[in-house]
Image: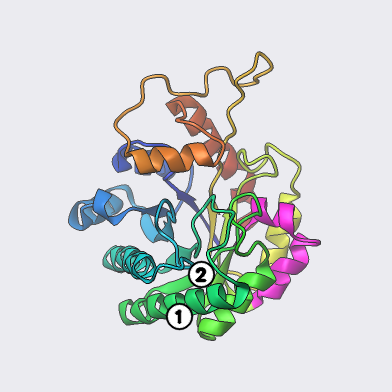
């Protein structure tokens, strides 16, 4: 196992992120799934300069992006988007694309269970075929019920992976597992060799170590199943707007340029634009919690 991180949680130049995570012992990055934001040659150069490899990317399934959409054109455009993320990861020598099939934040289905399952399976198969051609693995990720109605548990993600291919895997996230699973450790065991990626944030979605999750037991269970991939930092710090706030200086008041879609994604996840110091602290705390357990 090695320590990785997402970078969508704060809008900052990639070079700044890479310098920061190298300092704390991260080995790789799951780059934000917005291929139009990254020049491949420039990004490859930055990764090499800072000694960080691309582990993969997560699809930012926002707005009209939805593999479960009734509209055939919308589904086709969503497939094209996922393929573009796969291509970007391939060109950056990455290994994994974490796929969230339905729009994050969408809570009303477009069709019956049978219709949506058919749409999603067909669309995911098309994405998977492209991934195989590009040498990238697909890991289907379940989110909690407040972020998607489509599926929320490891068994459901495995059902989609099984419908696509024995070589399609899943990604699990400790924060979502803690909400949705009867036993999060059994969910990890259920995924077994099909677990291709693992995301971490504590039960309050702050950095690992700032909540109640049992990180020695979580990492121990990953070792038990022989997991040898990334443990990827994905905190989404909820902003406290009351006088009870423990972190009064966490919100960035003078943000750098950020695409509206990315800002909406961050805000929809219960967060806001974070100050550099607060963000840096969260990166450090995750590393200090996880690294001693995976070494």
Nearer-the-camera pick, 16 or 201: 201
* Farthest top residue in view: 243
Q: Residue at x 62, y 38 (%)?
A: 206
240 lies left or right of 273: right
Is residue 178 covered in magenta? Answer: yes
Res. 135 image quadrant: bottom left
Comparing marks 2 and 1, which lies closer to the viewer? 1
The magenta-colored residue range is 172-192
Q: Which residue is mark 1?
A: 122
First-in-chain label (2 vs 1): 1
Residue 65: x, y in percent?
Answer: 40, 59
Residue 180: x, y in percent?
Answer: 73, 57
Please say if 58 is above or below 87.
above
- Cα separation, mark 2 vs mark 1, equals 16 Å
Residue 83: x, y in percent?
Answer: 33, 69
Q: Which residue is mark 2?
A: 139
Res. 286 image quadrant: top right
Nearer-the-camera pick, 79 or 246: 79
Element on which disc 2 rests: strand
């Amino acid at each position: 196992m090695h320590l990785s991180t997402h970078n969508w949680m704060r809008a900052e130049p990639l070079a700044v992120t890479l310098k920061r995570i190298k300092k704390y012992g991260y080995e790789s990055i799951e780059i934000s799934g917005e291929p139009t934001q990254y020049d491949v040659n420039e990004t490859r150069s930055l990764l090499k300069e800072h000694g960080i490899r691309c582990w993969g990317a997560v699809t930012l399934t926002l707005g009209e992006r939805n593999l479960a959409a009734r509209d055939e054109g919308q589904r086709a455009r969503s497939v094209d988007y996922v393929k573009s993320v796969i291509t970007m990861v391939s060109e950056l020598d990455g290994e994994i694309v974490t796929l969230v099939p339905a729009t994050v934040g969408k809570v009303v289905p477009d069709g019956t269970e049978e219709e949506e399952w058919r749409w999603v399976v067909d669309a995911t198969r098309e994405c998977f075929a492209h991934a195989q051609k590009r040498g990238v693995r697909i890991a289907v990720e379940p989110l909690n019920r407040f972020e998607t109605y489509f599926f929320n548990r490891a068994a459901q993600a495995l059902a989609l992976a099984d419908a696509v291919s024995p070589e399609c895997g899943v990604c699990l996230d400790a924060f979502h597992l803690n909400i949705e699973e009867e036993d999060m450790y059994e969910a990890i065991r259920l995924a077994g060799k099909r677990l291709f990626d693992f995301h971490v944030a504590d039960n309050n979605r702050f950095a690992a170590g700032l909540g109640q999750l049992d990180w020695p037991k979580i990492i121990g269970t990953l070792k038990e199943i022989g997991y040898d991939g990334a443990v990827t930092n994905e905190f989404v710090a909820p902003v406290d707007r009351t006088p009870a706030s423990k972190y009064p200086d966490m919100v960035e008041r003078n943000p750098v340029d950020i695409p509206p879609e990315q800002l909406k994604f961050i805000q929809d996840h219960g967060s806001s634009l974070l100050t550099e110091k607060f963000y840096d602290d969260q990166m450090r705390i995750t590393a200090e919690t996880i690294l001693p357990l995976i070494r």
